[in-house]
Amino acid sequence: MSVAQFIGCGHLLRLSVARELAGYTESPGAYGGDEKDFCLRAIDAGYEIIELAGVHVWHDKTPLARDLPEQHRSGVCNDLTLVLRRVPAVLVVPTVVVKFAKHLLFSIKHGLFRAGLLGMRDFLSAAPEIWRARLPVRAASLAQFYSLSRAPRKAAG
């Protein structure tokens, strides 16, 4: 089954594809978004992200050694970075505005307001450098990525 992205704790990559796409792109935040960026670029290059039915990866999430506000801050920064870096120019401003609003609402709802604002500030500080290094994907690739992201998934079992 075709999917939009994989998660870092359970994936296989063709080395030739990883080399072609120059691996993961570094983001200003320390955590989050690297798989999403890689998958979006892979889709843009004509590759398909496949979920292998029946293959399970168990990854216990634990709050131990995790700083959730810092993780959220980084995730907000890197998600906004992805938009600025990969979204076609004509869509950047409306997409950034929508992402800012969604991150703000999520941050408030989950008691992470300060972390969310700091992530937005980190993004704004890095934005000029990100803009200069922009390598946007095609609008069709972005549409395919979002369509796959929203597609209903069959329950495993």
Image: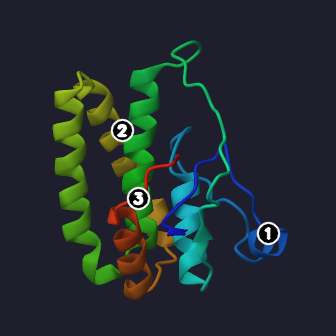
Q: Give the residue number, with chain letter if any, for mark 2.
A: 119
Residue 21 sits in which quadrant?
Answer: bottom right
Q: Residue at x 36, y 54 (%)?
A: 80
CA–CA distance in space, label 2 to label 1: 32 Å
Farthest residue, direction right: 15
Residue 50 sits in which quadrant?
Answer: bottom right
Q: Earlier in the sequence, mark 3 or mark 1?
A: 1
Q: Secondary structure at mark 1?
A: loop
CA–CA distance in space, label 3 to label 1: 24 Å
Give the side of residue 28 with respect to residue 87, left or right: right
For badge 3, the amino acid type reads Arg
Q: Secondary structure at mark 2?
A: helix
Is residue 130 at all visible to an observer of this figure? yes
Q: Nearer the viewer, mark 3 or mark 2?
A: 3
Q: How many callouts does the rendering have? A: 3
Residue 104 sits above or below residue 83 on the image: above
The tag on residue 14 is 1
Farthest residue, direction front: 157
Residue 82 sits above or below residue 108 on the image: below
Q: Are marks 3 and 1 in contact (CB under 8 Å)?
A: no
For badge 1, the amino acid type reads Arg
